[in-house]
Structure formats: structure tokens, C-alpha cells
Image: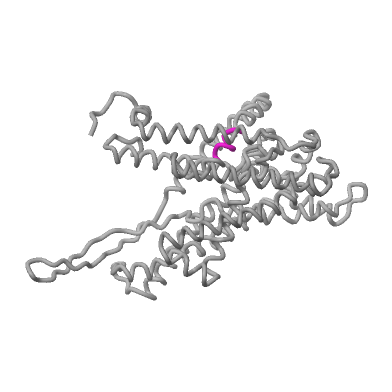
Amino acid sequence: MRPRQSRPRLLQAMIDAFSLPDLRRRILITVGILVIFRFVAHVPLPGVDLTALEALFERNALLGMLDMFSGGAMRRFSVAAMGVYPYITSSIIMMLLVPVIPRLQALSREGESGRNRINLITHWLVVPLAGIQGYGQLVYLQREGVIGSTAVLPMAAMVLSMVAGTIFLVWLGELITEYGIGNGISIIIFGGIVAQLPEMIGQGFLAKENFAGLSAYILMVVLTIAIIVIFTEAHRRIPVQYAKSVFRSGRMYRQAGSTHIPLRVNSAGMIPLIFAMSMVLFPGIVASYFANPAEPNFANTIMQLFNPNAPLPLGLFYWGLYFVLAVAFAFFYTMVIFQQQDLPNTLQRQGGFIPGIRPGKNTATYLNGVINRITWGGALFLAGIAVMPFVAKQITGVQVIQLSSLGLLIMVGVVLDTMKQLEAQLVMRRYEGFIK
């Protein structure tokens, strides 16, 4: 172990990381790929009216969510306009199909080779999903007057360019995972969100006349980040004992070992918020096709109800529904993930048991009860984070800063995961880490 330095732990850890050639190479590769990603995000598709596109973003909240995943590329409508969102959609679809389709279920039990096959299917599924999404975006933008009418060949070229941009970003993410630090896809999303911070800071300066409100807003953001860190790391430890046989001096002895299963309070991560946001925005998007500004009809009312920027009291309907859906999807997705893990059977096969609980059905009942109870904490946490932007605006009166709760969750999660991987690399090489 290296002697303790007088510098702060984090600073010393970064110096140690750059002093190791292989770790320094991983960090530089990650940074270099992020730079390439930002260049790609500024390669525009031709024939786009950026002024009309900016006005459309102000009217459509779903585009803002998609723009977050693309790192601002959709607002400029570059070749990377879809970001890695089709890959996220593909991953979610495969995660939901694995426990339903017997063939995929069998693949998931084949170990590393089965997981590689499922991963390959996930990547192939990205192509048609990206094509459908790209074509849908172009048709929608054409209807809104953002792009002019296009013939078949120009439209096909634009769709192929957008699909190629998505596949290229997914490939960059895979390179980061293999040769860099952290989860590549998450790092790509993180890089896009961070790239929008200067614009958010500029919006903050616009609110400088409301200094008290702006200060309160910043304080709420800091507290929200602290809460996200606490709930992201929170888990319930389930004690597990293993009985193993040891052969000594010609006789067989039974020895007991103990460990624990960490059940996370927020096992679902950010996925429930993506589901909830998509569901709560969908009716407004559909209604926008039938709304008539000159003669308001029922579609106009639906648009107002499902508009996140609607004034009170209409805004309460949207954010209240968002809160309820976040809780519901948190339970749904946690149960899906928990069933896929199949912990009771895994423990039984490995000779492990929970003290005081019989293996098999009783263990499954006990674990299901525990995961149901702790998921209430995770679900209410996610729902609270979901409505935090609305609450912050109502309390502080700051309207110019558009804070995304989903973006905060992604940023904090990626930073924690990357720090843990960097910590593991340092500890493995007998350097002092920076996470206590």
C-alpha cells in the first residue's frame, strides 16, 4: 500500500489513476470517444428549418425528453438526432420478452453464451426500431413544417443517415465499455446531458432578478442530488448461509459459510420514469394531430390536460398522473427484474439458505415480501423525483430553467458507477481509493 499523501483523497486518487499507463489509457479513450460523439451531434441533416424546429420544441415536451437522450442532437436535427434511444427501447423490449418467450428464457439460463446471444438480438432489433422512429420523426416534422416535402429517395437517405448515426453511437458506447471506464451507453447519455449544462447556466443568469428564488432552486437541486445518491446506494441485506463439504484426512467435514444478498431499494433504476413519461405524454401527442387552434375541440382539451407546462390547476392533473404511473411502473419493473433473477432457485442449487427460512417456496415467499416492502421506498422516491421540477417551479417561481429529473437520475447514476469502477481499478493495483 502506498503511503498516505497530504493531498485530498479524490485529488490523490486522480493523480494515481493518471500515473498508471493502462488506467490512463482507459480514461483518455473514454474522453476521446465523448469528443467524437459531440462532433457527430453537430453534423446536420439537410433541409431543416431550425427556427421552426425550435418553436416545435417549445410546444412538444416529448421531443425534449428525446433530445436529452441525444445530447442536444435532436434540437439541431443532426445524424445522431435519435441518440441511443432506440437501443434503450430495444433493451427494455428484450428484458420484458425474456420471461415471456420460452426460447429466450432458455437462452438466459445458458450462462455467458446465452447472454451474448440475447445481446446480439438486442443489437439487431435496434435497426428496425431506429428506422421506424426515424421515419416517424421525419413525417411528423414534415407535417409541422420543419422540413419540406421530400421524395422517396431523399426520405430514405435521411432515414438511413439517422439509423447509421444511432448505430455509430451504440458502437462508440460499446468501445467505452470494452476499452474505457464505465458503462458506454450510459456514458454517452451522460455526455449529452452534461453538454447542455452551459445552456442551463445561461438560463440561470436570465433569472438573476429573482435571486432568492434562484438560490432556493439551486438548493433544491443539491438536496435532490443528495437524495438520489442515498436511494441509489440504499439496499437491504438478506443474510445467507452456505453449507459446504471439505475432505480432510480421509474424512468428510461439513463447514458453514455466510454472506448476504443486497436487495436494492431502487432496483428498477430510471426505467419506470421513462415508461411513465412516455405514457403520460402519449395522449397529448395523439391529440395534437386532431387539435384545431381556430375552433378548439375535445382534442385541444386533451392537449391542455397532458401538457407538463400547463398552468395550475390543469398542471396538477399531468403531474399527479405522472406520480401515480411512476409508482406503478416501479413495482411492475422491479417484479419483472426480480423474477428474472430467480434468487430462490439459485440459492437452492448452490446449497444456500436464509436462516430461519426453509429453502424453496418459503424462501420465494419471504424474498417476495421483502422486495415488495422495500420497493415502496424506491417507488415513492422515483415518483418524488419525477414531480420535483414542478414542485421547484411552484415554490421558487423560477420558470426559465428546465431541469430534468430523469437527467439528474442518469447523471448521478453514471457518476457513481464510473467512480466505483475507477475505485476498483485503483484498489486492485494496491492504490488508495477515494470512496469510503
Horizontal placement of 31 versus 70: left or right?
left
User: Can the viewer see residue 426?
Assistant: yes
* Residue at the left extreme of this rendering: 249
Q: Is residue 194 magenta?
A: yes
| Region of the chain picked out in magenta, as a range | 190-196
Horizontal placement of 233 versus 154: left or right?
left
Q: Quadrant of the C terminus?
A: top left
Instruction: Identify which residue is drawn at 58% across, 43% down.
Output: 169
Please provide percent x and percent y for residue 424: 34, 42
Please provide percent x and percent y for residue 87: 59, 51
- Circle count: 0
Instruction: Identify which residue is drawn at 56% across, 65% down.
Output: 97
Q: Quadrant of the N terminus?
A: top left
The one nearer the camera, 105 or 64, is: 105
Q: With respect to residue 434, does 129 lie above or below?
A: below
The one nearer the camera, 252 or 279, is: 252
User: Can the viewer see residue 317?
Assistant: no
Horizontal placement of 338 versus 388: left or right?
left
The one nearer the camera, 219 or 184, is: 184
Please provide percent x and percent y for residue 309: 73, 43
Please identify the dominant SS of the magenta region: helix
Please provide percent x and percent y for residue 423: 36, 39
Q: With respect to residue 24, does 248 lie above or below?
A: below
Q: Is residue 293 magenta?
A: no
The one nearer the camera, 145 or 306, is: 145
Horizontal placement of 180 versus 84: left or right?
left
Instruction: Identify which residue is drawn at 58% across, 52% down.
Output: 383
Q: Quadrant of residue 132?
A: bottom right
Instruction: Identify which residue is drawn at 92% across, 47% down.
Output: 294
Q: With respect to residue 118, does 18 lie above or below?
A: above
Colouring used for the render: one colour
* Residue at the front extreme of this rendering: 153
